[in-house]
Image (cartoon, rainbow, N blue to C red):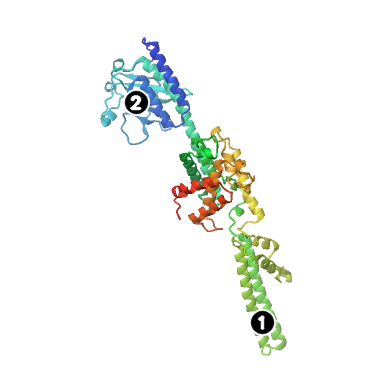
Amino acid sequence: MVVSVTKPLPEVPDRLRLEKLERLLEVAKAMASQRDVKALMDIVLEEAKAVAEAERGTVWLLDRDRKELRTFVAQGLAAAKSELRMPEDRGIAGAVAKGGRTIRVHDAYADSRFDRSQDEQTGFRTRNILAVPMWAVDQTVFGVLQLLNKKENVDGGHFTDVDQELLTAFGSQAAAALQSALLYEENRRAFEGFIDASVIAIEARDPTTSGHSGRVAQLTVGLAEVVNRLGIRTQWDPGEDGFDEDEILEIQYAALLHDFGKIGVREEVLVKADKLYPHERDLLLHRLEYVRRTMESDMWRRKFDLASSAGSAAAGAALAEEEARYRRELIELDELQEFVLACNRPTVLEEGHFERLREVQKRVFRGPRDASTPFLSEDEVVKLSIRRGSLSVSERLEIESHVTHTYKFLKKIPWSRNLRNVPEIAYGHHEKLDGKGYPLHLGKEAIRLQTRMMTISDIYDALTASDRPYKKAVPHIKALDILSDEGNKGMIDQRLLQVFIEAKIPETRLGKST
């Protein structure tokens, strides 16, 4: 049977009602700060059961798009899944959701809307039901709070008007808290989708670093969690006990987005594998091939002149000498080309190579219209003379500018108060404790602990990554040796590095071991 909500309330002790209302107000405060939907539904259900003194219950949320009721918390329902769904008009809960009115059933088995199947599956016997609508801010039904079986030793084992009054008020409070939590969850998922899309955009610009941002995030978060577990953050951040959930999220987001500024760097610079760009290398090789053709042309011209002036029989020795000279020049040119291509690789240039490049530049050949043309241009000599790596000074500065681009991009995002440090954490990931990093050349005291952790992770992954065309992957042990050397020189935080190594962060997070 259905009891109207307009029925006059019976006389009950004011003290009891006041105690229950005070308890609900306290719970409402607690609910307002809870952002996990499932945990919040647990709170709602447990408090509703306590206030109405019920045995079991369910919190149903209305999914209007799917026209379903769904729940994460269902006591007395048999299901192996973490989420249950049923049609929005099914059962007592469906009737409440559809009609927007409270339903109180004194005898569940006498009500045709009651679905006995769950009782049959669980062995639980439902005697009576109190189901109230949970109203959203826009005055639509947000969900249904349903309780089963008033405790038999209380109020004769039946739900009362007071239970209905309190549960209705509590349902509205619960709906507001749940709606807020769901909105927070939707916003979080949307923002994480944006971050994932940003990482994809970064890696699309520079496929050679695919997966780098994700690995740096895994390593940095792993290191932060170990610092928490050891309780040693206060050694670096006086007054701070450990990283809370929001700070861990800050670290994760900052690590995932630390290289986003690369989207503002020219793609050809980002993926530059050798000192010369591919089109510059091709132009040089075409020029040397032109030199070969010119040498051959010159040989045949000299042979023709010799044969014309003295006759082929008389000039035999001279013709043979021309042929031999041509072969020697070809060998010399091949060696020169091999030398230039070796200089083009991003390895450390040996002493003496700079002088030899200048000597090569001084050599000339007969170019178009007989113009005297050098083997190497000034720009080619400068680029081939890069001592280490593949980038010129200007190109390296352009690459380094990605940090500033990252910071400017991240500062444009309206971060929530609990994530406001993401831009600053990411900004310093190329700074060094000795002040020789970039772009701000910050000193030790100005670099955040979160940033120091990310720097270690970033360097480690850059060293061990196997997908960089301009270098070979460094073995795990060698990478740790390089990091230790930087720690000894005061460039990175040696104490954090010790935790990184002793806690086996790369092994546990990335499976690195060799």
* Residue at the spot 38% in from the left edge and 21% down from the top edge: 132
The local crowd at label 2, few if under 14, some if 14 to 19, many if 20 or more residues have their Cα within 10 Å, is many
Residue 392 x/y as whole percent: 65, 56
Amino acid type of the residue that numbered disc 2 sits on in the rendered structure: Gly
* Residue at the spot 42% in from the left edge and 21% down from the top edge: 170
Picture quarter containing residue 294? bottom right
Amino acid type of the residue that numbered disc 1 sits on in the rendered structure: Glu
**On the picture, is 226 further left or further right than 355?**
left
* Front-lying residue, 291 or 216: 216
Compared to 47, does 263 lie above or below?
below
Compared to 232, does 120 lie above or below?
above
Compared to 401, does 129 lie above or below?
above
Among numbered discs 2 and 1, the one appearing first in the sequence: 2
Residue 512 x/y as whole percent: 45, 52
- Work out which residue is located at the far bottom of the displayed protein and give it: 314
Image quadrant holding the N terminus, namely top left
Q: Which mark is residue 322?
A: 1
- Work out which residue is located at the far top of the displayed protein and give it: 11
Residue 433 x/y as whole percent: 60, 46
Q: Which residue is mark 2?
A: 57
Residue 372 x/y as whole percent: 73, 70
